Amino acid sequence: MLIFRGLSSKYALGIASILLGTMGLVLALAGYFVFEGTQALRAELTQSFSSIQSAHDVEALRTSGSYLGDRLFDPLYRLDVSALNEEIERIQAWLAPRSVLILDAEGRVITDGSLENPQYGRRYPIPKAAAPGEVAIEETPTGRLVHLPIGYAGMISGYARIALSDARTQAFVASLHAKVEAAWQGFVERFLAIALISILVALAASLLFGIRLSRSVSRPLRDMNRVVAHYAAGNLEHKLPEGPEDELGRLARSLNQMAVEHERARAQLMQLANYDSLTCLPNRNLFYDRLGQAIKKARREARGIALFFVDLDRFKEINDALGHDIGDILLGRVAHRLSRLVRETDTLARMGGDEFTLIVEDLVDEEAPRIIAQKLLDALAEPFALDERQLYVSASIGIALYPRDADSLDSLIKHADSAMYAAKASGRGGFRFFTQELQEQAHERLSLEHDLRRAIERGEFALYFQPLVRAEDGRVVALEALLRWNLDGAPCAPDRFIPVLEETGLIARLTDWALRESLSALTALEREGFGALRVCVNLSARQLQQANLLDLVDRVLVEFGMPPERLELEMTESSLLDDQLCQSNATQLTARGIRLAIDDFGTGYSSLTYLKRFDADALKIDCSFVRDMLVDPGDAQIVTTVLALAAGLGIESVAEGVESEEQGERLRSLGCDLLQGYLICRPLPLTELIDWMRRRAFGSAAEAG
Amino acid sequence: MWVWSLILLPCILLWPPDSGADGRLRLGVVSERPDRPSEALEQYGPLNAYLERRLGDAGVRVADLVVARDLAEMAQRIEAGEVDALIEGVIPTLKLERDTQRIRPSLLVWRKGQRQYHSLFFVRRDSPITGLQDLAGKTIAFESKRSTSAYFVPLFRLRDAGLEVVPAESEAPSPEALRYHFVGSELNQAYWVHDGRADAGAFNDGDWERTPAAIREELRVIARTPPLLRWLVSFSTDLAPEIEQAVSEVLLEMHLNPEGLATLAAAARIVKLEHLTDDDRANLAYWARVFEEFN
């Protein structure tokens, strides 16, 4: 019974039941008292009527006595039995007596009223000392016996003897009783009908009243119920009428207050969930949502979308150099400047870090995104005045177009990202549209990544070693371990696959193997009698971030029984800039006595601070400087400066990519400590290196000899 | 003026006479209770209504019942031509026929189960009277001066027997005269004789049978009269024969249907009606002679 589950239905039924019950009780009590009283009255009335009737009969007889005496006198006197019989008939009709006899003066029956007159002549006792007109009444067991003297002027000529029976009274009482009974039945029926109607009316009225009352009572609750259902459905705009200062009013106010708080919290949550707290721009979530909506709309309306990926160049360096606070302020300013360029219908979002996106809808042609991209770049070209500095920032922008480049959200994002990386790769501070070529490159990269994963699983990598010799005497002091890999039977260029290993993080899976192979090579060389050489192993930023790097290094050194100073780890400046963990690990490694070399020095910031902080043991001059040092004064200057710096700091300098004698001579003359390159030896597998080492040792010995 | 006379004369000549021939029947009765004319209406009203219904088809209109208080009034009404048919006993009928000469007995009426009856004379069983002759100087109780069987018939029989019969209240009657009382009813006659208030009584044989057994056993019949037809229907001599015929037919068939039978019973306990036979007419002739002789 679902209809009885509602509060108002329960109230209505409850109130109606109480009212009905009360009315029913009143009716029942009224009925009981009326019935009881009327029943008692019935008996009294019957008795009373009976008595009155009897008294009335007697009184009538008394008052009629004289009249009857006169009336009967003539027929009696004339012995007119027919007339007497007629009179008897009248008396019988009047009084319904048990018998009427006309007696003569001696009490003999003259007539009993019947034609047969069987009692004729029978003698009855007569009352004494009665005068004409005086009615003598005596009570008998069965009624009354009335003697009516018939005479004239004191002379009695006979009597009318009337035997009245109780039967008449009883008949009268019975008749009265029957009438009362009928009236009583009628009364009972009417009473029951009235009671029934009353109950029905009461039922209807009670239900009506109950329903109205319960509705008025439960209406606020129903309103609240409805509004709370809206709240539950997330619609917080409905408000309850707060009404009077009672429980319901307070409850309504509390619910309204709750809704306001909930709305506020939800708004905050929405802000947090969808907006970037730093720049107040839509965040990645909202960006995805907006882009999804934009694509649907564009698909529906057959329009175009341009998606811009904007990545600030070198922001990490600014952040590290000036601190995160400044970096955050700068991001806010950048966001502000970019925001001013976009239309209301466009969505500028911050994807995280220094990466922004812009969705431009209702694209008409391809020229528009080009103009927008240029405007964005121009906007950032003006320096930012921060903390009493002028900061110059550039950005690389990748652009992908819907539906030309992609028709799905993920593809569009991926393509814009690819385009951005392409822009960055092609010299920063510019923009690039996504092209099919980019896509092919991406595909190729994916394919390479797949091959690399398989190579790791199959152990297809190999380490080659390139010796580092002392510039002054050409003695081999160290070996640099270099990763090599054959793809489809042919050697794959390291600058092709190593970046992919680094970007994908796969390189980390090679750390342990590379360390073991390197130390194993040292052990082999030592066994061959080439003395205590050291091995240089390149560590990318990803490897430097490995949480278990220190344990790994410790374990391998212990395993091979190798002193830490025979292991040199090479890392670029940018690796050290990357994050806290890299820096911490670098510090920990040098603290263990492991050598630290800064690779490709001169290509980055060439920060003296870092050299000091990490207690570097060697600086490796990038091969690009060495290659042109003899023809490019700039490069020569850099090489000279770096060598001087190393000498100044008292750390070892290493020149990479030394290919000619002239280069070697120049470096030697400039005070470079170690040389490495094809001039000395190309990278070789261990066995070949051993052979080379043997030959070189033999040569040296022969030379010496 | 003479033109009007020419027009009116045929009308006067052709105007129907004010009689039964106009298709109207007026039934007359003499009330037995002159003080209560309603009784006669109660008794004969239904019969009159019955005739009215039945005769309507024959084109006879039945007028209101004519109730006369006594024979004299009835005679007067008959003479005035206000009565077309009459229901009465033999002696009153003979008297009215003789007095008016305008009625003629036509149908015999069975009444109280009797076609005819006779009157009888009775005395107390212990009375020394044995015959009519013993009644000289005695008293006799008659019913009423209109009664046929309890007055006229016994009176004529007594006179026919040579007795002088005088009212009891007659002043100075001869010692031999038989004095009579009217006591109002046949029952009273019996009581009077039984009580000794009268020496003898006379009424018809039916009354004798109806007398209470206890009384009758104390009485003794001493003489009887010749028989007399119970009751008669007479028609006015002015009544058209076809109307008389139509009325007679209705009356003669009344006892054959329940409604008619009940109507007859209500009207003075009549059982049926039939035509007068020759014997009946001879009987009537006898009584007419006696009536003429001793009335």
Image: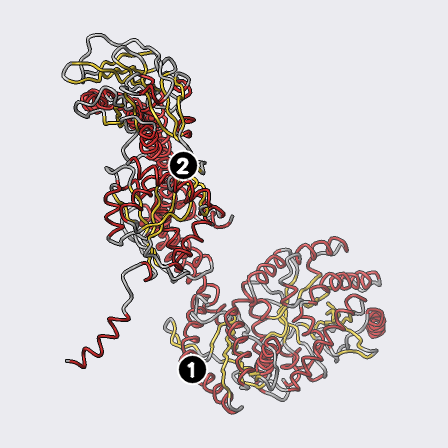
The image shows residue A326 at horizontal and vertical percentages of 43, 68
Looking at the image, do the residues carrying marks 1 and 2 touch, with CB atoms under 8 Å apart?
no
Q: Mark 1 lies on which chain?
A: A
Q: In this view, does A181 lie to the left or right of B36?
A: right
In this figure, which residue is indicated by the disc labeled 2?
B228
Residue sitting at 39 percent across and 60 percent down? A264
Q: Is residue A497 left or right of residue B270?
A: right
Amino acid carrying mark 1 in the image = Arg
Q: Which chain carries label 2?
A: B
Q: Which of marks 1 and 2 is in front?
A: 2
Residue sitting at 82 percent across and 69 percent down? A686
Q: How crowded is mark 1: few (under 14 residues within 10 Å), some or many (20 or more)?
A: few
Give the total number of marks visible in the rendering.
Answer: 2
Q: Which of A117/B194 is in front? A: B194
User: Does residue A41 appear in this view?
Assistant: no
Q: In this view, does A163 lie above or below A213?
A: above
In the rendered image, the quadrant that contains the C terminus of chain A is: bottom right
In this figure, which residue is indicated by the disc labeled 1?
A343
Q: Which of A316/A242 is in front? A: A242
Q: Which of B160/B1 is in front? A: B160
Residue sitting at 27 percent across and 42 percent down? B38
Q: In this view, does B168 lie above or below A685?
A: above
User: Does residue A590 appear in this view?
Assistant: yes
Q: In which quarter of the image is residue A96?
A: top left
Question: What secondary structure is marked by label 2?
Answer: strand
